[in-house]
Amino acid sequence: MTAPLGAAMEAEIGETARVAADLIASVGDLAPALRERLPDRLVGVATIARGSSDFAAGYGRYLLEPALSVPVWSAAPSLVTRYGVRPRLDGVLAIAVSQSGRTPEIVTVLERSRAGGAVGVAITNDPGSPLAAAADVTIPLRAGPERAVPATKTFTATLLAFALLAAELDATGRSAVDGPAVVAALEAALAPPPPALAELAGVLAGAEVAVHLGRGVLLPIAGETALKLIETTSTAHLAWSTVDVRHGPVALAVPGRPVVVHHARGPVTADAAEDVAALRARGVDAWVVGDPLPGARATIPVPGDLPERLRPLVHAVRLQQLALATARARGVDPDAPPGLSKVTPTG
């Protein structure tokens, strides 16, 4: 019997709850080593990543900046590897993220960041990788092998690693992670997805261009959704914040072109609601992934009673299920997209 399209991707999504439970159980062992190496006066956090890892790091910014009350920024690797910048980073925590741990430029930037005074942390699925060797402290994702090209369980585990890191570094306790609640929500998300997801997948499968919107903790998730759909279907997906889209990209929102709004109830709900209302007035269907918004064509719910800052951990499963279903609806295999490989050797 021939395996269904995306069999590896589907199986790896299905491992997410177990991976999360293992990571939650193990991360406490790393906390003393991390605290011991933190700068006496932490002045900022630099994240170093590409692709899906960079979207995960973008989510980390929304957790680490409130937890630490210092700026968090995404480093530009090419400034180091192509333009020869030697950063001075005394008092900085540099967090490099790579599922494989083998992307040369990410390893190089972490090495040079440490040479410039930073404390280096690696988040990787391979604790024996060059990236782990270049770091002061490594947070292993413990996700096991991932054969499908699109990152699934490793992406969600990276989001969780940032959430756990923020919790360990936040002296106030406001960033605490309820591990059992997270695992339960992930398990609920791994049940057969709601019918609306298949309906949206069918719409996306017939579109060559789609728009994704999010804000706050779900802005990086909107970006990752667009990337996953590009990887798995070879169609064009573009992501913006619910406010940046109004500065010109909204011209792409025309009747017959899908718009997907990624939403969790919280401080940015009003922005998402305004966008859905404006789209409806233009005759454009808005599909919502997450919590409902008035006027949406349909809502694909995301389970779990988690605080807004942790909802992306479960939202990630929905976006992966959506990419898988859309690829299958188009008759393409998301496990091995043409022209892509698991490790992207940028230098």
Image (cartoon, grey):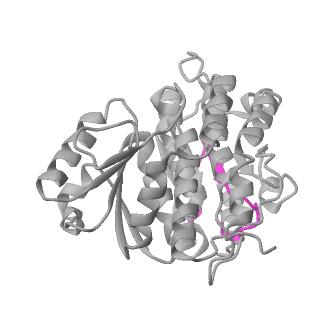
Q: Please, which residue is most extreme toward the top here? A: 172
Q: Which quadrant of the rendered structure holds the C terminus?
A: bottom right
Locate residue 138 relative to residue 211 in the image: left or right.
right
Nearer to us in this view, 295 or 305: 295
Is residue 206 positioned above or below 9 on the image? below
Camera sees residue 113: yes
State which region is magenta.
85-105
Q: Please, which residue is most extreme toward the left here? A: 281
Q: Please, which residue is most extreme toward the front here? A: 1
Which residue is painted at 47% across and 38% down in the image?
A: 62
Q: Is residue 337 magenta?
A: no
Q: Please, which residue is most extreme toward the right here? A: 128
Q: Is residue 89 magenta?
A: yes
Camera sees residue 69: no
Nearer to us in this view, 339 or 126: 339
Is residue 330 positioned above or below 279 on the image? below
Secondary structure character of the magenta stretch overall: loop
Q: Which quadrant of the rendered structure holds the N terminus?
A: bottom right
Locate residue 76 relative to residue 251 in the image: left or right.
right
Task: Determine the image quadrant of residue 277.
Answer: top left
Which residue is painted at 77% across and 39% down in the image?
A: 18
Nearer to us in this view, 151 or 132: 151
Q: Position of residue 110 (x, y in %)?
A: 68, 57
Which residue is painted at 56% across and 24% down in the image?
A: 175
Q: Position of residue 169 (x, y in %)?
A: 63, 27
Give the number of callouts. Answer: 0
Is residue 4 positioned above or below 64 on the image? below
Task: Determine the image quadrant of residue 150.
Answer: bottom right
Q: Position of residue 181 (x, y in %)?
A: 63, 24
